[in-house]
Amino acid sequence: MNRRRVLVAMSGGVDSSVAAALLKEDGYDVVGVAMRLAPDAEQKSRPVSGGSCCSADDFEDARRVAERLEFPFYVVDLRADFEARVIRNFVSEYLKGRTPNPCVLCNREIKFDRLWERARALEADCVATGHYARIASEARGRFHLLRARDGAKDQSYFLFSLTQTELARTLFPLGEMTKAEVRAKARELGLANAEKRDSQEICFVPEGNYAAAVERMCDAAHIRPGKIVAPDGTVCGSHPGIHHFTVGQRRGLGVAAREPLYVREIRSESAEVVVAGRALLGAGGLVLESLSMVDPSPFRLGTLNAEVKIRYRHAPVGATISTLSGGRAKVVFRNHGPAVTPGQACVIYCGEEVLGGGFIQRAL
Amino acid sequence: MAARLAQLPPTGRTRNPEFSPRPLPPRKPLRFKPMRRIYLDHNAGSPLRPEVVRALEELAAGNCGNPSSIHMSGQRARRELERAREAVACAVGAKPSQIVFTSGGTEANNLAILGAVRGRGCRRVVSSAVEHSSVLAPLAQLKREGLEAVLLACDSEGRISASDLRLALGSATALVTIGLANSEVGTLQDIAALGASVRQHDALFHIDAAQALGRVALDVGTLGCDLMTLSGHKVGAPAGIGALYVRDRSIVEPIMLGGPQEQGLRAGTQNLSGAVGFGVAIRTATKLLAEEAGRMGFLAERLWERLREEIPGLRRNGSQLARIPNTLNLTFPAVEGETMLIALDLAGVEVSMGSACAAGAVEPSHVLLAMGRSRHEARSSLRLSLGWSSTAEEIGEAAARIVGVWRRVAQAEPAGVREAAQ
């Protein structure tokens, strides 16, 4: 009689649809929700008369899945929270010359915080998403966040900031599955979105044009044009604003040189973009801030040998992590490491397990 | 630390016995206790009345053709259509020839506004900020076409004042369009006073009575209007049928062009089953009006009293005196209306909030905003509307469920607190 109710965040894609289906099969009382997040102004590409809905088509896909699998489905409007907690940060980070990762923030602030409040109000015991990651529990009631079985799809990087309390009420039904298995399951269930393409973009940035999105969402006075300089200070050119650049970027510099040039550093105070050849790109380590550990109990102040992943698509590299004051930590790569992009998440792994992570403050 | 980490599984496939995936409940078919659903959204659409269902079954059994056809089947269809037209006309004190069937209230409003204004020399239309979107959107269109659309403000109860209307009227006014009963808060406008002002000018007077039909008595003569919108599914007819009362055929130009149906004012084969259902529904609703309005009013008051006792700070929106009896618009303290709406639905109580956008999310009500409520207040307001099928037992049960859901939601997702923090 007392079935566990789970609120499943549905995007209309195949992953969250199959996640909902698996929970339904397992006997959960599934309630599907699609979140309306992107602000109206970012939805111009798809005009809908009588109201502007970001992804009305995607929501329709999710609704169809809910109808087919016979569970209730609702669209919830979390635009105000998304704007306040994710977009503002995204814009201000870019204007500071940093490269934010809004998906990490969205997970922490919206899916596993704001949506959880909503879930509790709807008498749900937990929230589920279609993320590829696993949660393991110990008998002692501690939870571990692990990589997904499908290494190619693993999304644990975006989830490093989940805490014990959040993991306790979260389900990732796809953690043990590969993408191919998920699609096969969707076909078996006859879901219309079984072959739907994966989304690659940040949901509120149309066509992946971050700079244009930042300009639309900020005051023109905050745009910071400046000079492009070599490491020795020689001016190589000028640029329309530091928000156009990310460390490690090669394209779109507008500077002719004998060897390919990359962005090595963005100096926020002087609005200078430092470019250099590949050899000068890497760093020996980094300082991260807003350190958050999945299970903080074993980590007091101290040193830890583990691996870090400093961009979603990078392979983890060996590093020594030592905690500093003020929620910061120093990460020293075991070998000379890759380019370090301030603003991105630096996630600490030990084998399969996510120990925690933070946001990159600066390279060392 | 190192010892603990050494226990971790090296790959995803091997399992440390200490690391079991989170236990899932056993797979077994679970039986629901059937939950009685309570429908409190009659302003969006009432269930079909049993009389209507019977009439539609009879109609489907008979062989009716196209009402415009010459043959016997066509003539039968024509006869049914005209009987329905008589019923609608009779219910509002009009002549059958003054009733134009449309696809619903929205089309009737479009026809009234666009059809009456285009082709007239006058350039100005006067309406109010609390109208339905099927009035506001055609007005916005006329504005884009270069006409002047004036939207009167309302007071905190949603009432429009006749003196404001007098100030807005001028010799160039083609049309005044006002909703008799507001669909969201239930406030009734003082049509006698407003109409008197309109008649001092040469403007046409259109009343959107979609939400008033079946809740209060309607008579086009008493109301003194030139055009009046009616909608079928608010009184227990199927959705997809409505009507426009047109005092004189010459005051409106058609917006739908094609055939000569509906005296040339609305081309296209008529929705016969819809019209027949509308005829039966409006006849029944008119016959039972006094009884149903009395019962809905009594139950709505009882619901309000019960909720007010249990929910401190609950606020009722709209006019206390001039309103339709079936509508309660309530601002719930410390909750998101959207969450309340969903939680109530999961608890089997069906209510509404503002209007749904294309994706199905809810927007705060423009009516409440026009009445001076904050966005936050508008976002925590719900509309509960009763109808012909509401019973005392249902209302008692609804009150208990609403109180329970409110307590839980206010505790789990305290809206006011978060709003202040942002």
Image (spheres, coloured by chain):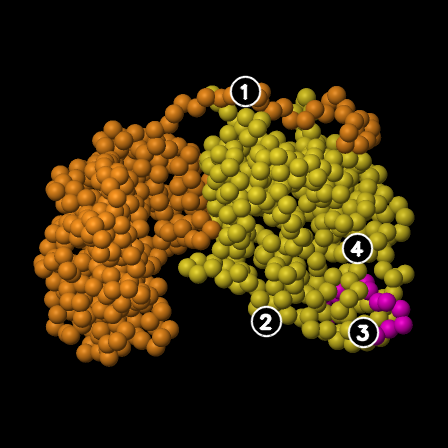
Q: Nearer the viewer, residue B137 or B164?
A: B137
Q: Does A121 sit left or right of A252 as displayed?
A: left
Q: Which chain is orange?
A: B
- Chain identifier of the residue bearing label 3 in the image: A
Query: Residue at (53%, 46%) from the top-left corner?
Result: A61
The residues tagged by marks 4 and 3 sit, at their Cα atoms, a distance apart of 22 Å
- Chain A shade in the render: yellow
Left or right: where does residue B303 sit relative to residue A253? left
**Amino acid at dot 3:** Val
Quarter of the image with the N terminus of chain B is top right
Q: Position of residue A119 (x, y in %)?
A: 50, 37
Report the mark closest to the observer, 1 or 3: 1
Count residues near mark 4 (Cα–Cα under 10 Å), then give few for <14, some for 14-19, many for 20+: many
Q: Is residue B97 above or below residue A302?
A: below
The answer to which of marks 4 and 3 sits earlier in the sequence is 3
Circle 1 Cα neighbour tier, 10 Å, few/some/many (<14 / 14–19 / ≥20): few
Instruction: First in sequence, mark 2 or 3: give its number.
Output: 2
Residue B49 is at least partly visible in this image: no
Assign a secondary structure to mark 1: loop
Q: Which residue is mark 1?
A: B28
Q: Secondary structure at mark 4?
A: loop
**Disc 2 on helix, strand or loop?**
helix
Q: Identify which amino acid the numbered label 4 is placed on.
A: Val
Residue under label 3, please give it: A255
What amino acid type is highlighted by mark number 2?
Ala
Q: Extreme front residue here? A: B71
Quick check: do tags 2 and 3 share a chain? yes
Which contiguous range is marked in magenta? A256-270
